[in-house]
Image (tube, helix red, strand yellow):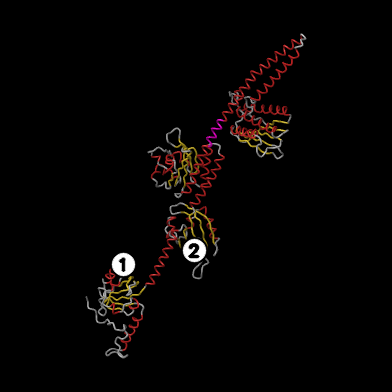
Amino acid sequence: MRKPPDVYPKPQAKESAEGIGKVNGSAPPGRDRAAVRAERLLAALTDNSWDRVGILDEKGIILYSSPSCSRIHGYSAGELQGRSSFDFVHPEDLERTRRLFQQLLAAQGQRAYMQYRVKRKDGEYIWMETTSVNLLEDPDIRGIVLNEREITARRRSEAELLATKARLEYLLNATPAIIYAATVTEPPVITFVSDNVRRQFGYQREEIIGRQDFWNRHVHPDDAERVRATLAGLRPGRSASLEHRLRTRDGEYRFVRTELSITAGKKESPPELAGFWLDITDRKRVEAALLATMECGETLIRATSERDLLESICRVIVKMGGYRMAWVGIPDPGSSQTLLPVARAGAGEDYVDKARITWATGEPRAGGPVGRAMRTHKPVVCRDLAHDPRFAPWRRAAIKRGYASVIGLPLMWRGECLGTLAIYSDQTVAFQREEASLLQNLAGDIAYGLVALRTRGEREQLERQLLEISEREQRRIAQDLHDGLCQQLLGASYLAANAARRLTQRTDPEAAPLHGIAEILRNAAVDARALSHGLHPVDAGPRALMKALENFASLTSRMFEIDCRFLCPRPVMVRQQTIATHLYRIAQEATGNAITHGGSSRVLVRLSHAARGHLILSVRDNGSGMPERPTGQATGMGLRIMRHRAATCGGTLKVLRSHGGGVTVICRIPVPTAKPRAQVKRRATPGAVPASARGS
């Protein structure tokens, strides 16, 4: 080790450089006043400075320490001189400090800056900031000169500031809202955005900050004008709120709620736009799913057939729910464990035709969400069709049609899977828990609707069969009455009348009673004939209904002594005798109700054409009207039977109160009507046989 020069002052009782070279206030011999003044100035600076000046040798031994060390470290200069500076360094900083010191020794004039902790005399560690320079080769110094300053308070403030900043960053990243600031320009230029934009929308902050085209490129085109109008209408101190769609880095659009305001600004800072984006996509999707579920509930009530129900459900899901496509599949009766699409709606619905989905175990096309839902009887969601390996058989076709995710929902009823409902979305974030739960409930409602329709269909089929059996039995009885009893009564009447004439010629007193018997038999035959006609009122042929209703109106007028008329503005031809019979029975029931319960004196039965191949039968009376609720069992049963007859024919029946009093029963039925005979003859081709010639 080099021997240090004999220039470092020895510590005195009063540790100061002030007395160096000073005797009785005069300069020592051989030294001028300028040198003494310079030494005194140096002493004043080192004695009164808050910084500590020191000199170390190449091993870190303290050769010199300015008197300020006592204020900083609690040690006097004498206590420090000759000790290793590393003895005071905090153990956690020791290795780093030694490494920097070795780098400092590498070359003359090398400088180093470091911060580290040292131990005071009272045992407390304090932070020091040190600037060192290597002057070991300087013959007048021969040491490492350092200047150090205590920065404990500053380090504490910096630590608190860093902790506050870290806490703020944590809160900004943890909050669901993305905080941003922008210039009040057109368009606004974002000057700050919280780091959670990377997690929620995939952008790095650098991709947003300073971009003038961010708003124009990332707000959905359908929402852009509304967003621009809101920004243009903002004023300092005012705030605004709106919902719009914002594009993520991967190209999807998400719904956000934007809250923004303009700060008033100060002299040193211009006004600034401040706000946040809150992702509300899940909420919007749940709202849309809820609306679709509610609308599907209405569809379930209105549906009259399975096909009508399922097709309407698919349309509602796409329109109200905002989904890309929806379809329903049921087990294919002609293929084992394969789904047969029966209803679909939305974009690219031809996708279903080539899907060929099965739920057979081990089949490649059974691993998708729809097949698994059918097999496991549980909802299955695939949120990333582009990368899910189980969706490989359908991936190319699905991506081509804009599908990004899908949910398969089993249609369950009492442990049996009736089929599946598949819903496709153009977003990978679709079908989160609450949304999927709503759609699962919808699938349950659809299954219930299917069962209800099938049960109702079976019941209606049974009722139709019962009505047909009843009508057939009535026709048989009518025929038996007409061909049997009527003929026998007429025959007996004829025989009695002949016998009475012969007795009359012989002036036999028994002739008169026999004439009475013949009359009774003739009346009985007429009554039997009327009964036969009542059991089978409508004959075969397209004009039979008009004739039957005309006879019914005439008979009703005579029997009940009321004004009952039949009106048919132009001929209405009905080929199907079953439909004609149902319409006759409806007119008969409505007229009977008007007379029996309404006390009507006038009834009008009207048969007419309507648009789109429909016909309308209406019965209007001038009675007391219809009560709020049926007061008798017969009335309620009659209305139900009329409605059932109309439904059996595929039509509807309405009962309306007339403004002038009374009730109007309107039955509207889709029916192919036969053309009048004259028209058939005009349009018939040579050699063709008219329908009237073939019979109905």
Q: Residue furthest right?
A: 507
Q: Give the image quarter of residue 43.
A: bottom left
What kind of residue is marked 1?
Glu
Q: Point out the frontmost of discs 2 and 1.
A: 1
What residue sits right under mark 2 in the picture? Answer: 183
In the shown orientation, is residue 44 left or right of residue 688?
left
Residue 220 image label: none
How far is disc 2 from disc 1 in space, using C-alphas?
46 Å
Q: Give the image quarter of residue 31.
A: bottom left
In this view, the residue in front, 617 or 92, is: 92
> Is 513 drawn above or below residue 692 in the view shown?
above
**Residue located at (61% from left, 22% from top):** 476
Give the residues in magenta: 452-462
Label 1 CA crowd tier, 10 Å (few <14, some 14–19, many 20+):
few
What residue sits right under mark 1 in the picture? Answer: 92
Residue 411 at what x, y percent from top left?
Answer: 48, 40
In this view, the residue in front, 248 or 309, is: 309
Q: Are dots 2 and 1 in contact, CB under 8 Å?
A: no
What kind of residue is marked 2?
Thr
